[in-house]
Image (spheres, coloured by chain):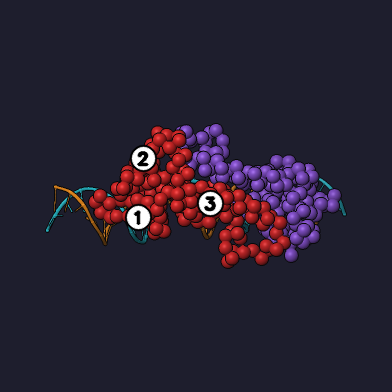
Chain colours: A red, B purple, C cyan, D orange
Amino acid sequence: MRISTKGRYALRLMLDLALNDNGQYIKIKDIAARQKISDKYLEQIITMLSRAGYVKSVRGAQGGYRLAKRPEQYTVGMILRLTEGSLAPVACLEDEENECTRADCCATLELYKRLDEAIKSVIDNMTLEDLVELQRQKNGNDYVI
Amino acid sequence: MRISTKGRYALRLMLDLALNDNGQYIKIKDIAARQKISDKYLEQIITMLSRAGYVKSVRGAQGGYRLAKRPEQYTVGMILRLTEGSLAPVACLEDEENECTRADCCATLELYKRLDEAIKSVIDNMTLEDLVELQRQKNGNDYVI
DNA sequence: TTTAATTCATATTGACTTAGTATGAAAAGA
DNA sequence: TCTTTTCATACTAAGTCAATATGAATTAAA
């Protein structure tokens, strides 16, 4: 039941882009330095976000990334699902093709449904803007101490 | 964010013991046959439950297992934590020794705390007895179709 | 027009986890 | 004594995680 580094780094990355947004494009190297995360690993992660249209990119010198939308337009769920894949606690809740033949008589499925709803209600009701506000309350714009 | 087979099988195992409790000790082989799970794998899992005192065992011919307590005395959380380990979505919420140095300034920690609470509120408020009742509503005492 | 900086693309790796199998000892009833 | 069962431990193949590594494509600046 862990969220992997991919999802956690993606959230920090998006949060970093939001906090440091000044109209310029931001280099992955700078984010990696601020967040103390391998820049090559962050590249892979931001590629996912870029392909999904969550960030805009410009190549070459003075290139970089910036958010494609305003922070309140991203839910945490969007970012986590993109990078982590489904967050459902069991595969049979993920989609129809994983549906279990025992679904009709499976008592534990009810438990997993409740878990799934509980998780969704958290991640789909929190936005990147909420994280930005929490961060500002804690430390101003500096993400790292 | 998946619950592994260990935790899921443990729940089905305990549910099977609860549904088939007739005062006798139940063989792991019978449970494995009903649940269509490898009996050797189930042995490993029930060993955990046994060591924790969740089930009582008797060795030798006519031996087997039975619940140590009444179904309403086990929460789903107890069973899952024992077999899966911590269900916290990030390690830094697990215990003090995993606490992160960035905790004071980490906005995402707030998200993970909310997720953790949401998960706990489901698994710590559902008992084995609740699963038994759900199962009876669905299919009578037969766990497998 | 060259050079440096940057994103984009893909392959590789070592450590770890998952989901079991395999082997056999210990205990207890028939 | 023989069979059945739990108990204990070792092993394994496949997959996942968390990166590294290598280099091509693109763009701004010198």
Name the mark on residue A124.
Answer: 3
The amino acid type, in three-letter code, at marker 1 is: Lys
Say which residue appears at 64% left-offset and 50% top-offset. B7
**Distance in Å between CA atoms under marks 3 and 2:** 27 Å
Tag 3–tag 2 contact (CB < 8 Å): no
The percent coordinates of residue B61 (x first, y second) are 81, 52
Mark closest to the chain's N terminus, 3 or 1: 1
Assess disc 1: are there few (<14), some (14-19) or many (≥20) residues with their C-alpha within 10 Å of its C-alpha. Answer: some
- The picture quadrant where one finds residue A99 is bottom right
Residue A26: where, in percent of width, then height? 32, 47
Q: Which residue is mark 2?
A: A34
Numbered disc 3: secondary structure:
loop
**Label 2: chain?**
A
Which chain is mark 1 on?
A: A
Q: In the structure shown, which secondary structural element does the residue marked by tag 2 occupy?
A: helix
- Is residue A52 in sight in this rendering? yes
